[in-house]
Amino acid sequence: MTDLQAILDSIHAELLPRLGEGKVADYIPELAKVDPKQFGMAIATVDGNVRSVGDADIPFSIQSISKVFMLTLALGKVGEALWKRVGREPSGTAFNSIVQLEREEGIPRNPFVNAGAIAVSDVVLSGHAPREAIGELLRFVRYVADDESITIDDKVARSETQTGFRNIALANFMRAYNNLNHPVEHVLGVYFHQCALSMSCEQLARAGLYLAARGTNPITGHSVVSPKRARRINALMLTCGHYDGSGDFAYHVGLPGKSGVGGGILAVAPGIGSIAVWSPGLNKVGNSQLGAVALEMLAARTGWSVFGD
Amino acid sequence: MTDLQAILDSIHAELLPRLGEGKVADYIPELAKVDPKQFGMAIATVDGNVRSVGDADIPFSIQSISKVFMLTLALGKVGEALWKRVGREPSGTAFNSIVQLEREEGIPRNPFVNAGAIAVSDVVLSGHAPREAIGELLRFVRYVADDESITIDDKVARSETQTGFRNIALANFMRAYNNLNHPVEHVLGVYFHQCALSMSCEQLARAGLYLAARGTNPITGHSVVSPKRARRINALMLTCGHYDGSGDFAYHVGLPGKSGVGGGILAVAPGIGSIAVWSPGLNKVGNSQLGAVALEMLAARTGWSVFGD
Amino acid sequence: MTDLQAILDSIHAELLPRLGEGKVADYIPELAKVDPKQFGMAIATVDGNVRSVGDADIPFSIQSISKVFMLTLALGKVGEALWKRVGREPSGTAFNSIVQLEREEGIPRNPFVNAGAIAVSDVVLSGHAPREAIGELLRFVRYVADDESITIDDKVARSETQTGFRNIALANFMRAYNNLNHPVEHVLGVYFHQCALSMSCEQLARAGLYLAARGTNPITGHSVVSPKRARRINALMLTCGHYDGSGDFAYHVGLPGKSGVGGGILAVAPGIGSIAVWSPGLNKVGNSQLGAVALEMLAARTGWSVFGD
Amino acid sequence: MTDLQAILDSIHAELLPRLGEGKVADYIPELAKVDPKQFGMAIATVDGNVRSVGDADIPFSIQSISKVFMLTLALGKVGEALWKRVGREPSGTAFNSIVQLEREEGIPRNPFVNAGAIAVSDVVLSGHAPREAIGELLRFVRYVADDESITIDDKVARSETQTGFRNIALANFMRAYNNLNHPVEHVLGVYFHQCALSMSCEQLARAGLYLAARGTNPITGHSVVSPKRARRINALMLTCGHYDGSGDFAYHVGLPGKSGVGGGILAVAPGIGSIAVWSPGLNKVGNSQLGAVALEMLAARTGWSVFGD
C-alpha cells in the first residue's frame, strides 16, 4: 500500500517555499489577523488511521466548510423536501452574488453558496431558538469528529455579524420572496456561528470520514447518513463545493471538496478516506490557493481521483 | 460479478411503460421527426465486452455528445493552451445562452455549452478547410469506435444550418471579441456537422471507452489520450456535461456524462466501462428524460457512482 | 386662455366609469386597505392659482414621490458631489431590483429607484439622528407646499419597516460596498418615513410648483433652488421618474413626472404649472394606471407636453 | 431676439482649444480615419433660417442618427403596431448589448439601440428588396432635408458589413426569436447602409426641422408626420437617444437628441428649431464629447431646455 505519511511529508516539503501565497480573506476583520504562512494537512482513512503533517493540530476557522455539516443536518430533518428551498446546480457566479436570487425568485442555486447556506440554516432552525440550533450543530460536529473539544470562536462570529452586510442583504432578499420562515436575525445568528466553527485539520478529516465510508464513521461505528445520501452530498461537493472554481477544482484534483475562506478545504475520496488541508492564502475565486495545490499533488500521487487512476 | 445483461434487461422492462415521456427537440426540424418511443442502451466494459438492450443498434443524431470527441481532438492539437479560449466552469445558464459571453467578453464558460463548442471547432479547424476538419473528426470517431460505418447525417446538418440562428449569433458574438480565428461560416460548418454525427448506442459506448480505461481503448489497444487527460475530460463531463442540469445529474447518477438534444447520453464509469443510452424525449433543461432515469437505475444497481458505492 | 377647470372636470367625468382599474399595491399591508375608486387631480399654475377635481383634498401616501423632495434636499446639502453616490441614468430594471447594484458595485442607477433614494437618505442624514432628518424633510415639504398641516403617517411607516425586506437588502448591499455612511437602520428609518408622507393632490401640486417656476414658489415667493437645478431635477423626473415605465410615460404624456406606489403622480409643466393626480390602482410596472391616463388627457388638451404642442 | 449666430460663434471659439478631445470610433475601420479636430454646428429655426459655424458644410457619417429617420419611416408604414416589435424604454445597458435581448425574448428595448434599429429596418423592408428600402430611406432624407445631393458612403457601408459581428449576432438572435421577418442579410444590408448616410450639419439640421415644427418642414411646407407623432419621436429621443448616457444628456442639455458614433448629434428644440453638431471624438458611452458640451452651452445661453428656462 501507498505510504501516505511519506506522501504528506513530500507535499509539505515541496510547498514550504511557497507558504504565504494567495491573499488572506480580509473582509472579516478577525480572519485578516491569521498568519498566512501556516500549513497543515491530515488524512483519515476508512481503516481508522489518521496521518498528518505541519500545522494539522492547530484549529482554524472552517467557515464555509461548515456548510457540509449543516446540509447533512438539514437533510436529516426534512429529507429531499429540502430541494424546494434550494437548488442543486452550480451557480456560475461568485459565492456572495445576489443576482441569481433575483432571477430565480429567492431560491438559491445550491446549499454551498452563501444564500443557499442561509436557507439551510433556516431549515435547521425549524422553530427552535438560534442558540439551540447552534448547539445542535456543535454537538453534531463533535459527534462525527468524535472530539468534545471542538468549539465556536465567538470573536469570529461577532466579527462576521458586524460586517456581514452582503449576507444580511441575501437573507432579507430571500425573506422578501418568503424563502425564510424565521426572523432574519435568528437565521443569520445560526449562519454566522456555523462559519465560526474552529477545527484543526485532524479534527476536520475525522469529521468528514462518514462521507468517504458509506455514511458511517468507521472509527466510532456511528451511522450518520445512508450510503445513498453520502454519495449525494459528495456529488454536491464536487459540482458546487468551490463556488465559481468548482470546475477547476474537479479538473485538477478530481475529488469532492468544500472550501472555506479561512483557507481550509475538506476533500473526500469515496471508499478511501477524508482529507483536510489548511493554508490561509486564497486565490481569486476565494479558495485556498496552496490547499488546492496540495490536494492536486495528493490525488496525482495516490490515484484517488474519482475520474480514474 | 454483476450480471450486466440482466440489469440492462430489467431497466428496459421497467421503462417500457414510460417510453415517450419528455419532449422531442423541435427547434431542429429534422430531429422533430424522430419516433419518441425508441429506447436503447449499451455498455462497453474495459474487458472489451459490449452488452446492449432495445434499440441499441439504431443510429441517432448524437448532437452535443460530439463535443466530447471535439474536445479530445482540440486538446490533442493545442494542449492546455485551449483554456485561453474557453473556461472550465459550469455555466449556470442555458446551453444556448449568450448573456455570459457578454459578461465575460467572448470567452465561453466551458467546452460543452454551444459557445464553447464553437470555440473548440475553431481550434480544431486550425487553418484547414471545414471539409478537412469534419473529415478529421469523422476519422477520429471511427477510430475510437473501431467502426468505419459511422457517418454524418447531411439532412440534419443542413437542417441546423438553416435554423441555427442562435448559434450563428453566438459565433458572431465571439468573433466580435476576437475569440474566433476563422470565418464564422467555416467554424459553424464544422460545428453543425459534428452535431449531425449519427451513431448507435453500441457504437457510442465503444467510442467512449477510452475515457473509462485510462485513455486507451482496451478493445483495439489504441492509445487515445494520457490517463491524466482522460481524468480531466471526465471531470469536465461531470461538472458541465448536462448544461444547467449537471448538478442534478451528478446528484442522481454520479457518473461523468454528456447529453445531446437528440436524446442520447454518454456516461463513463472510470476503470469500469462506458455507457450509452438513447431516448428522444427531453426534460426541461434539454437532457434525455428517460436516459437519465435509466442511468440512475444502472448506477444504483451496480454501485458504479464515482461518489461511493 | 384655456379653461383648466373645464378640462379637469371633463377628465374626471370621462374617467369615472373606469375608476378602480389597476391593482392597489399590496406588498405594504397598510396601502392595501385603500379604497381603489378614489380619484383626485389638482393643478397649481405659476400665477398662483390652484384648480382641482374629485378627491383632491384627501391625503394619501405619496410614497416615492417624496424622492423628489429628498433629492432637492440632498442637492442643497452636497450639490453635484451627490453624483459620486448615485447615477443619473434610467435603470432598465424594476424599481426594487438589486441586480444592477451588484454589476455597478453599489452605486444605484438614479435617485428615483429605491436603492438610489436610500443613498440619498444617507446623504440627507449627514451625521444627524434619523428623527432630525425626518423632521427636516417634513419642515421642507410644509415650506414648499406652504401648509403646516402635512404629516407623516406612522402606521404606514411602521408597516413598511416590518415588511420592507427588499429595501433592507438593498441598503445592506450598498453598505457592503461602502456606499452608506450611517447605520443601515438609521438610513432606512429616514427612507421608510419619507415614503409615509401623507399629502393631498392640492398640497402636492403646490409643493411641486417651484419645479415649474424656475426654482421659486410663486405663491410664497420662496426661492427653493436655482433655475438650473429646477431644470435638472425635471430632467431626472422625465428620464427616471416612472421606473421601467419612464419611456412610456414620456411617450404618452410628455411631462417630467414622479410616481408613487400609493397611486399618486406629480408632474411638472415647466413655466406653466405643477400637476398632482391620485388613483390607487397601479399598472404592471407600478405606476398609477388612471393617473397616467389623466395626465395624457391633460397634456393632449392643453398642449403642455415639453416635446411640442 | 437672441443673436444665434453670435452664440454659435462664441461656442466655436470657446471649444477651439479642446478640439480633438474624446476618442474617435475605431471599431469601424473607415471611421477611424476621420480627422478628430473637425467641428461643425448648424441651427435651423422654424422660421426657415439656417445658421452655422465651423465645418458645418462637411459631410460626415451620421451613423445612428439615421435611426430617427428610419423610425419615422417605420411609424409611417405600420403606425403604433411597431411597438409589438420593439419597446419604448431606456435600455440601462450599452448600445450594442445583447443581454437584454435574451432576458426579454428578442424584443429590443427601444428603436435607438442597435437591436431596435435592426428590428425597425426589418419593418421598413416590408417585403421589398434591400436596395429598394435603402432607396426609400435616401429619398426620404433628401426630401426632409430638401437636398438631392445627400448620399450614402459605400466605403463606410462596406466597412461595417465586414466588421459588424456584434450586429450580425444581434440580428440572428432576434431571428431566433422570430422577431425578424426577412433574411438576416437583407435586414443588415438595410441597417449598414442607413448608418453610412453622409450628411453635413447644415443638411442634418434642416432634415430634423420637422420634429421641431409640429411635424411639418416650415421651409418646404412638406407635412412629414402629425404633431402628435413628432412629439412622440422627440420623447423617444430624449429618453433613449444617447444610449446609456441619455439621462446625463437630458440632465446637462435638456433637449431631445440622437447621437451617432461618427461624432454627430441631432437635437430638437420643440417649437424653436433643430440643431446639428459634429465633433468626432466620443466619450466613454459612445456619444460625441464636445458635441454634448456645445449643446449644453447652447441650451444654457438660449434657454431652450425643455425643462425650463
Image: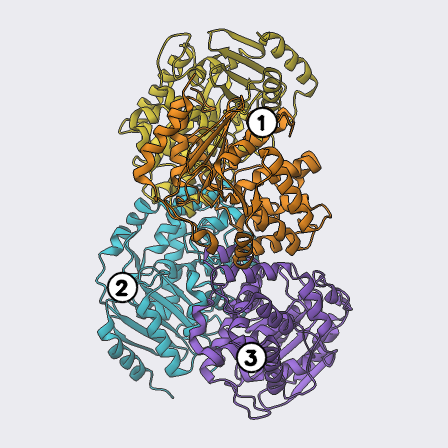
Chain colours: A orange, B yellow, C purple, D cyan
Q: How crowded is mark 3: few (under 14 residues within 10 Å), some or many (20 or more)?
A: many
- Residue D97 visible somewhere in the drawing: yes
Nearest to the observer: residue B20 or residue C131: C131
Residue at image coords 55%, 12%? B56
> Mark 3 and mark 1, same subunit?
no
Nearest to the observer: residue A214 or residue A246: A214
| Distance of label 1 from label 2 (alpha carbons) | 70 Å
Q: Do the residues labelled 1 and 2 touch (CB within 8 Å)?
A: no
Nearest to the observer: residue A80 or residue A263: A263
**Residue bearing the label numbered 3:** C269
Q: Is residue B65 left or right of residue C188?
A: left
Q: In which quarter of the view is residue C162 placed? A: bottom right
| Distance of label 3 from label 1 (alpha carbons) | 67 Å
Q: In this view, does A188 lie to the left or right of C79?
A: right
Mark 3 or 1, closer to the camera = 1
Residue flagged by tag 3: what amino acid is it? Ala
Q: Is mark 3 on a helix, strand or loop?
A: strand
Does A256 appear above or below B272? below
**Residue bearing the label numbered 1:** A231
**Residue bearing the label numbered 2:** D59
Q: How crowded is mark 1: few (under 14 residues within 10 Å), some or many (20 or more)?
A: many
